[in-house]
Image (cartoon, coloured by chain):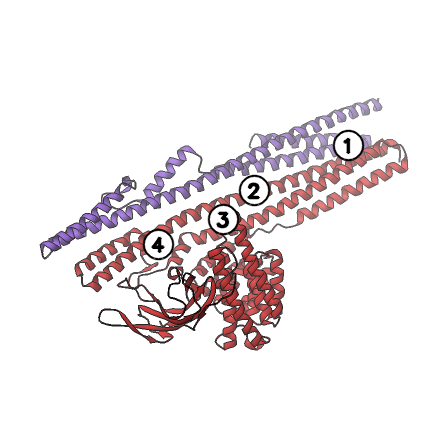
Amino acid sequence: MEEKSSNRLETIVAILIAVTTVLGAVVAWRASVSDDASGDADFAGIQASMDAEETRALNFVNTYENYGTYTTYKRYSTLGDLIAEDVANAKNDQEVAQLDAQRANAHDLAIANQGLFPNKYMDRNGSYSVQRQLGEMWADAAKKKDLYPDPQFADADKFRQKTNRLLQSLMVIALALVFYTGVELVNERVQSALATLATLIMLGGVVMAVLIELGK
Amino acid sequence: MSDEKFKKLIAVLIALVTVAATVVTFLQNDASQRDNHANRDTKRYAAEAMGRKVSGDARVNYDYNKAYQAWQELDLLASSATNRGDEAAAARYTKLRDQMVGLSPLLSAPYFDPKTSDTNIAKYEADTYLVEIEALTQKFNAAGLVKNEWDSKANTYIVHLTLLAVALFLLGLAATISGAFTRWIFSGTGVAVALVAVVWAAQTWARPVYDLREQSGAIEAYASGMGLEHQNLHKEAIAAFDEALKAAPTFADAYAARARAKWANGDLAAAVADHESARANGDASANTAGELAWAYYQLGRFDDAIALNRSALETAPGELWIRFDLGLALLASGQTDAAQAVYADGIQNAAQQVADAKAAGKVPPSDLWWSLDADAASGLDDLISVLDGTNAAPPPDKIANPEAARKIATLLINQLKSAATSLEFTGKLPAGKLTAQISPFKFGEPVTNDKGETTDYTQGDTFKFGIQSVGVLFDYAGMTDGQEVVFKVYIDGTEDPSWRVISPWDLGASGSAEKPISLSYSDNFVLPAGSYVIEMYVNSLLAQRGGFVIEQ
């Protein structure tokens, strides 16, 4: 009767070892999937980071080129205005003609530069808003591509953590195997207790893995 | 032990090794993930540093080359108008100039002083982007080291896993073998291999990974120091590097940077100690080795300088400045033949670099001319000035065979300068010998008549600031019309290429000549204060050189 009972326990333990091994393999698979996802998120983050820096660099280069052209425009425009003020105080016709020619030249140069920068960023006072242009260009670029790497990197870190925790649960599950194999080495009185302990450890590992998988 | 019991024991051992394998797998995965994380950081820092540099450059280029330049031009125009007596135009330009101030923060305090029209572009660059880039660069370096360390750990764990797999195989084999002795051998070996793997894995796990980014404030203090050093604020920079080293005592780059700051601040001995610390903490760069070798040379430690230069050349054989520093140390130590051989080798190396660049359709590296002329020839000039008693480093009493050193240094200066000019203009080393005889240069301030024509020169070698023109006076013989003649002007040791004159000779075989140094078409130009050296080359061969000083 006792031998029959022992054989039954051995069969159950053998089945549980097989089940534990399969569960361990499933957890290892989930850890691998999570690890792969962290790599993908990292790649997306790096891509966003490169795009963001490329956008920032190009925006700065273009904006300050525009601002440089605006500066030339502003210089000649103001110079023309100042010469025009001096025309009124000219002492003779020759000086008037000379100053007026200089004024016309300055204003012509201002006009030549006026079309070379986006004048929508000029305000009513005639000053140029570099920050507004940079902001608009960034917003435009952000509509076309992802410029924010931080969320991607946060996802990658989350997946990494998940992988690690799944592997920790795998260690717990593997520990159950030690107790299952130990069942055969101990006397019959404690065999059931050891098998129960192993099962509890295995279940603990599985529950842990399920909770990690569910994101809890 | 019965067969059944042995097999049960083996089963338990297999289970234990399996648990160990899962633990090592976890550690391997963890190390691999940290490796990936650090790798990601390096890419991110590199991208950010590149982006910030380009955007920072774009901004500073505008501020300096557009806004500040406009201010300067208008200021000059106002000054010119005042000189011409056109007050209305002067007022106009002044008003317009003042309006430019609002276009850039560079034209406001603390970067700009309108009274002197001086701008502190170095501070502006440091504040705008340089400090940030230095920090990102250091973070990149630190992340790279962290990546390497975790990569090494992850790979080592794979070795442990392999050993554990071998152990499992041996234990499994032991369970299938009937011979008692053999199965004990297999099981014993399996257990031993597993134990080795577990202990080794534990050691690997316990090995700390140093991350400079976690040393609170070290990188920030270093970057701040680099920003201050960029502004030539050496004392402040040294204090910042002190702070960085307090936070991270093994920070090699901070030692190297502090060494440069201390050197610039005049404390050569302290600079040497810091350079040595940088090397002791892992800075294996040829640059640091070359700088330290130069410091040894300056202190008269020629043997140390020679050994270190040779060591640096092993890692960077193409660095001409290190090669020429080696030649200089050999010359100062009395090894004249070896010195000349090193210089000849360096000149050949430079010629080869030019030939390679030309063959590849590229421009020769710009530091080549600096290495030949500003570095190598200047070093020899300085050695001669030490022998003349006008320079104190290296200590004159340490120089072996001074007269031979002077003679060979003069010869080498001619060779180096002729090689640099010839390589630049013809792409080849100079051929033939100099046949022209040019008398030593004399210098004079022009004396003009009522029509502004130069009638004579007031000769001297020192002139007061404010002088608009200096004439270079010399006699010549053995010249041939059509020979290519180059004049170069050096101000405080650096050539100002805007003064360079290249023209075919057309003054006949012999006579006297005057070469004016001036911008006579300007209302405002005066020669800047400094020490001037004029060099004359005939068919790329240095024919004469001489100098004068414009006082402050």
Q: CA distance from mark 4 to mark 3?
A: 30 Å
- For chain B, give the colour: red
Residue B218 point in image, percent of width and height = 52, 56
Element at badge 3?
Answer: loop
Kind of residue at disc 4:
Tyr
Q: Which mark is residue B64?
A: 4
Residue B37 is marked as: 2
Side of A19 relative to B468 (left or right): right
Of the residues tagged 3 and 1, which is closer to the observer?
3
Could you tell which of marks 3 and 2 lies nearer the N-terminus? 2
In this rendering, which labeled residue sits more in front, label 4 or label 2?
Answer: 4
Q: Tell me the amino acid under the disc marked 3.
A: Lys
Q: CA distance from mark 3 to mark 1?
A: 72 Å
Q: Where residue B530 sits in the image (x, y, percent)? A: 39, 69
The residue that disc 1 covers is A181
Along the viewing direction, whichever of A38 and B285 lies nearer the viewer: B285
Residue identified by numbered label 3: B362
Tag 3 near tag 1, CB within 8 Å = no
Q: Residue at x 33, y 53 (%)?
A: B105
Q: Closer to the observer: label 1 or label 4?
A: 4
Bin the neighbour count of mark 3 within 10 Å (Cα to Cα): few under 14, some 14-19, many 20 and up: few
Give the chain letter at badge 1: A
Asked if marks 3 and 2 touch (Cβ < 8 Å), the reply is: no
